[in-house]
Amino acid sequence: MADVILTNVRPWGAAPVDLVMSGAEIRSVLPAGTAPAVGDRLDGGGLLALPGFINAHAHVDKSWWGQSWVSYGGEATTQGRISHERAEREALGIPGADATAAVLREFLRHGTTAVRSHVDVDLGVGLRGIEVVREAAAALDGAVDVEIVAFPQDGVVRRPGVLDLLDRAASAGATAIGGLDPASIDRDPVAQLDGLFGIAERRGVGLDIHLHDRGELGAFQFELIIDRTLRTGLRGRVTVSHGFALGELPADRQRRLVEECAQAGVSWATVAPVRTAPLPWQAMREHGVPVGLGTDGIRDLWSPYGDGDILRVALGFARLHGLRTDEELAYAVELATTRAADFVHRDTHDIAAGARADIVLLDAENVQDALVRAPRRQLVVAGGRVVVRGGELLV
């Protein structure tokens, strides 16, 4: 395959360079104007270049994106949202390949080239949602790299048969399995964690547990997860999603939990929602606790919000946590790119030789300007292939 050369771009706002892409990989990064005059050439026009965005927490199977407006209904609690979704999803064709592909295309239009998506696995849909997501990803011909977390949205031990479904999903290629509020949903945290960690150990997959429980109840479950991670040797393979309680605890308790998470290699995924307590992000960065950003659901039966732009989520993270300095604002963008590499099993994710050629060009002065304005993505390259030009999809 002939090389593709993307000329005159500014990685992270630095001096202009030429990027030589061979197949799906960046082969070399050269000073602007020095790339060989061979292969296909694309003029980057001096635009800011960032790595493709990584969505570390999505639910692409749940959306009604592309359909007529669906009014919000049901009760505004975790159990209320579950019940409402179970009652209404079939009438909306959820999960459906067309709506899922529409969500992935919207992600791509905004520059997201890798997604870690939770996919519902329950007694109603079985493993069908996983097949739907795989079909939708295939329709984009690999433009978006999708990893699947088999997710028991309706509970685990309170629904006999779900653990078996999770085990089957893990054996069929899901890279992780999920859990949900072991205390408040299943009301038996020991049994849920026994089942989930047992599958993760047996199948060699990761584990991602959604924790909405607040305050001391949430903290208690953090402690159980950390202890179980250390005892099972699953260091580096366990993620807490949401984990609102961490930001609500006293400072000394936060610090101890962050240190313990670092020791156990437990990572954190957040969508930085409004009206939640800020996470102790400085301590998490200092101790090396990985943090990933996600869109969560996009126009689904849980919430009418969401536009698929992970850069806007990074902006939300910055505003929620009071980030102001140039270094802090750049860190928020790193959370949506380079620092999220582990969430999609990449050794490196950057504009560098040897990395996958996932590149986003924006008309922005620097990284900070790009974050606070979230301008249109002028060009998106996914796996060495141009998939968005002038904000318009080409796939």
Image (cartoon, rainbow, N blue to C red):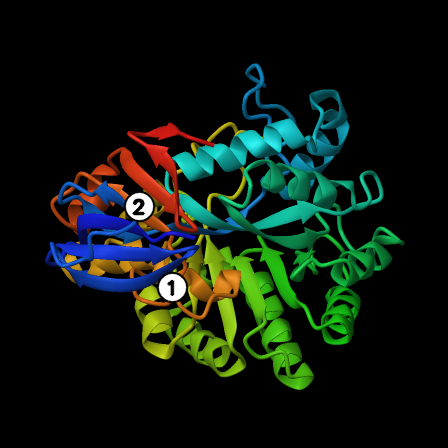
Camera-side mark, 1 or 2: 1
**Amino acid at pointer 2:** Val
Residue occupying image coordinates x 11% and y 54%: 33
Q: Secondary structure at mark 2?
A: strand
The residue lying toward the viewer, choosing from 277 and 393, is 393
> Mark 1 vs mark 2: which is more N-terminal?
1
Horizontal and vertical percent for residue 318?
Answer: 28, 51
Whether residue 332 can be seen here: no
Position of residue 178 in the picture relative to residue 45 (left or right): right
Instruction: Provide the secondary structure element on which disc 1 rests.
Output: loop
Residue situated furthest front in the rendering: 38
Q: In the rendered view, would you say 198 is above or below 59? A: below
Q: Residue at x 43, y 63 (%)?
A: 341
Give the percent coordinates (x, y) of residue 34.
Answer: 13, 59
Q: Which mark is residue 152?
A: none
Which mark is on residue 360? 2
- Amino acid residing under circle 1: Ala
Q: Return the x and y of residue 369 as percentages of the image width and height.
A: 16, 45
The image position of residue 123, as x and y in percent, is 85, 44
Residue to which mark 1 is pinned: 355
- Rendering quarter of residue 198: bottom right
Farthest residue, direction top: 68
Tag 2: Cα neighbours inside 10 Å, few (<14), some, or many (≥20)? many
Question: How many angstroms separate mark 1 from mark 2 (CA)?
Answer: 14 Å
Viewer-proximal residue among 203 and 282: 203
Q: Residue furthest right?
A: 160
Q: Is residue 271 visible to us here?
A: yes
